Every structure is written in structure tokens, then in C-alpha cells.
Amino acid sequence: MVHKLIGKQIKIVHSNNTSLKDVEGKVVNETQNTLEILCLDGKIRKVFKRSAVFALKHNKKIIIIKGKQFLKKPESR
């Protein structure tokens, strides 16, 4: 499991909010329930972890993570 998401490139591959599908960028902040993503268009979007599935690169591999899997504060994982 990836412990630190801040600074990672991430893409939303599925979301209950269809306007967020395929949004990608760099994670700039993380709370227990949300991620803030600096998107390629320069906007920061707040995404609820619970309602999305994410793809991110970690150690040269692409990992698919259900947001429900990391509903904890980063320091508690």
C-alpha cells in the first residue's frame, strides 16, 4: 500500500461524480476523507476518497486503489 499520496501523480478512473472521471494531476493535500488534486488545467479539485477509484504510479508500476481502502489519515496508515 502507498502510504504518502501528497506529491504523487494520480488519475481518477471511476467516480460516482461523472464530472471527475479521467481527472488527473498531482495530489497537493490529503485528509482522512478527501484528496485535493492540482489538475492539468491548473484547478485544484477536492475529491471524496470514498466515491472514487484512483490510478497512480508507484515504483514504476501503476496501482489501482479504491478510495475506500485508504479512508484514514495518512499518518495512521
Image (tube, helix red, strand yellow):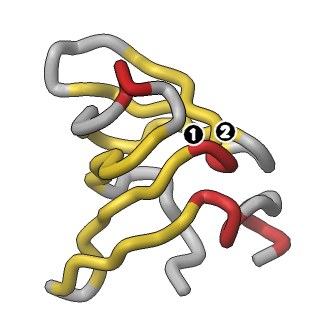
**Total residue callouts:** 2
Q: Residue at x 60, y 58 (%)?
A: 67
Q: Is residue 55 above or below residue 62?
A: above
Q: Position of residue 24 (x, y in %)?
A: 24, 39
Residue type of the residue flagged with mark 1: Leu
Of 61 and 16, nearer the camera is 16
Q: Is residue 75 left or right of residue 19?
A: right
Q: Which residue is mark 1?
A: 35
Q: Is residue 30 above or below residue 72?
A: above
Q: Is residue 31 left or right of residue 4?
A: right
Q: Is residue 19 above or below residue 63?
A: above
Label 1 CA crowd tier, 10 Å (few <14, some 14–19, many 20+): many
Q: Residue at x 39, y 26 (%)?
A: 18
Quadrant in which residue 38 is drawn: top left
Label 2 CA crowd tier, 10 Å (few <14, some 14–19, many 20+): many
Q: Residue at x 57, y 40 (%)?
A: 35
Element at badge 1? strand
Q: Residue at x 68, y 49 (%)?
A: 50
Element at badge 2? strand
Q: Position of residue 22 (x, y in %)?
A: 23, 38
Q: Position of residue 73 (x, y in %)?
A: 80, 58
The numbered disc on residue 5 is none
| Quarter placement of the C terminus | bottom right
Q: Are marks 1 and 2 in contact (CB under 8 Å)?
A: yes
| Quarter placement of the N terminus | bottom right
Q: Which residue is mark 2?
A: 34
